[in-house]
Amino acid sequence: MSDKIHTILHIEDDDIDSMVMGRAFKTLEIPHQIIRAKDGIDALNMLRGIEGKEKLSPMPNIVIIDLNMPRMNGIEFLKEIRSDENLKHLCVYVITTSNDEQDKAQAFKYCVAGYILKPVNLESFKEVLSALNNFWKVCQFPS
């Protein structure tokens, strides 16, 4: 496994999905720090340090986002960060239940690094994270 600690901003409104992701990272012994936001607005406030939120420091190496969330969905979040000079560099993966072709096209329009359908069980989820970790090992992420 990689010795680099991945700082991950996980934008997910579902507590169980968030818990499964944390367990999968721990089980696979992927060095990580997960910061969770419950929707796109919460995440933007963290990234920008506004509305009573302390600005994330360091900035996340990776953002993992669901598409279907209240207040600001994943596509709206992507549109917002790609138009922000300070955030447009963020590496974003979509992990969602949506297999809709229009959702996929919209996500890739905003330059996501990957679009992954949510697995239904922990073993499938660990397979996805293991594949991502193998990719991260060969990538250089800004500190």
Image: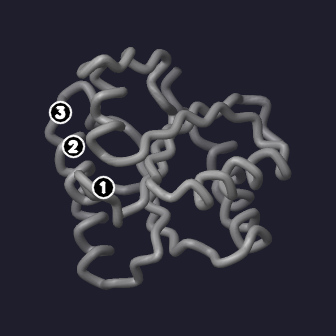
Left or right of 74? Residue 96 is right
In the image: residue 65, left or right of residue 21: left
Kindly report the distance in space between the C-alpha atoms of the residues bearing marks 2 and 1: 8 Å
Q: Are marks 3 and 1 in contact (CB under 8 Å)?
A: no
Q: Select label 3 or label 1 by which is in front.
A: 3
Q: Is residue 7 above or below residue 25?
A: above
Q: Look at mark 2 in the image and give the residue it sits on.
A: 82
| In this rendering, position of residue 100 left or right of residue 117 | left
Q: Are marks 2 and 3 in contact (CB under 8 Å)?
A: yes
Q: Nearer the viewer, residue 120 or 90?
A: 120
Q: Which mark is residue 111?
A: 1
Residue type at the position of mark 3 = Asp
Amino acid type for the residue under numbered disc 1 = Cys
Label at residue 84: 3
Mark 1 secondary-structure assignment: loop
Is disc 3 placed on a helix, strand or loop?
Answer: loop
- The residues bearing labels 2 and 3 have C-alpha atoms spaced at a distance of 6 Å
Dot 2 or dot 1, earlier in sequence: 2
Return the x and y of residue 136 as percentages of the image width and height. 63, 45
Q: Quadrant of residue 50?
A: top left
